[in-house]
Amino acid sequence: MLKVFNFGRNMHCGFWKPMMYKRTFLSEAYRCEKAWNDRLQSPLLQKYPPEDLFIILENKFHCDKKVSALDIDIFANSIQKKQQVEELLSLLQKLRKTAEATNILDSTHHAVIRYLLNNECTNELMNILHDRLNFGIFPDYLCYNILMDTYIKKEDYSSAAKIAVLPMLQEDSEHLITNALSIYSCHKYLENPDTWQKPPEPVDDSKEEIKIRVDYLRNPFFDDHFDLTEPCDLVGKTLAFQGKFMNNELGRTCQLRGLILYKKYQDVSKLIKQWLNGVEGNIVYNEVFKLIEKDKKDILKEQATNEFEHLMSEVNVLKQKALCMDSLNEALENNVKSAVNKQHDIDINKQMQIYTEWEEKRQLVLNKQLEEINRQIKLKEINKMKEEMHVRERFLTFFENREKIELEIEKIKSAQRKENRRILRIRGARKKLKMLEEQKEYIPPLI
């Protein structure tokens, strides 16, 4: 009877409704959706419809060649429809090319990311976050965590890994949940690494040969950080970066696998020597050795070089030491759950306060801009009044200063005569002046 009851609970309108469970770590409350949507009740965001505001901002860019960062913030926070994605990206790129880019508000970054995520614009979101030079959008901790948790739930591990590498690029390891989700996302992505391919090199299909004279040639430079484009390098460096701060067998496992992916074999050799001499207890997880062999086969495709073979012999030495035999996946999941338990409520309370501060700061910046606009208007009025008073003063004191004015007029005429004589001494000047005079007097015939 109980089986029948359970079967009936999963039926809807006569159809079988399968129960699907997807991995997620963060609760719905973590997203602070209600508090975030309450911003739309602000009179400042309701003043203009987004469609009209975009036209106003476009006209400002066209006429003044710049627009206030506050205006972009208001637009980014007010839009909701998916059809306005291109408008938002266009305004961000234009803002980035002006001096106002330094005044961009923190709420703008948050609004852009949440807008694209809510409208499932994954490609646009990844392009913006990885093209910081042209868009200048940087996630905060809440955005990092929501993005990775969302893509993990969708089993889109390549997108989650693309988000996970961003804190590493910013050398940021201050948030527990972000660190734990970054490691988890990278490990899950490495189960199927073909889902993230290196961006293709731009192809110049122009047939015309253009020669440009340059003063000197720049030597090629690779900073081994922001210039990284290979997915395995980015993921490997992320694992090594996050694992460095953990100081346990899970952190050492991440460092070992990450640095091998990152092809830093000398660093791996140094770490192994340190671990063999200084670590008591479990050094790494036993499962990592199978993962390294899988990485070697699927990603690295490493040739049998002396350096790599020597490294593998040192890695094999670790197998003889004390290893953790527990499941690595369970350890990664427990690491995330532990971070969430410690930081979950703290993040929610902090973010609720931040939303209120953003509202106040937006209004404060607006008030300052209005004060500056009013000051400029008053300054123009004062200058205009001063000019009118100066003209009036000259008019009323004309007869008192007549001789002085006549002397000034004579100086101006003398300077004009001197300039005319200089021009006439130029070869061919008289002929050209005569031609200009004839063109001036020319009267076209009546038709």
Image: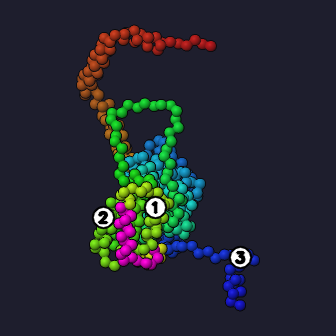
Residue 367: image tag: none
Question: How far across and down, in percent of the image, does residue 117 sit?
Answer: 53, 62
In the image, what residue occupies the spot 41% across and 53% down?
A: 228
Question: How far across and down, in percent of the image, does residue 245 sit?
Answer: 34, 69
Question: How far across and down, in percent of the image, does residue 377 sit?
Answer: 39, 47
The magenta segment is 310-328
In the image, what residue occupies the spot 50% across and 57% down?
A: 126
Front position in the image: 385 or 155: 155
**Mark 3 highlights which residue?**
16
Q: What element carries label 1?
A: helix
Seen in the picture, residue 75 relative to 201 is either above or below; the reply is: below
Front position in the image: 225 or 271: 271
Q: Residue 339 magenta-drawn? A: no
Amino acid type at image mark 3: Trp
Marks 1 and 2, how far apart at CA: 20 Å
Residue 296: image tag: 1
Q: What element carries label 2?
A: helix
**Mark 2 highlights which residue?**
270
In the image, what residue occupies the spot 38% across and 69% down?
A: 316
Amino acid type at image mark 2: Lys
Place residue 444 in its image quadrant. Answer: top right
Front position in the image: 193 or 386: 193
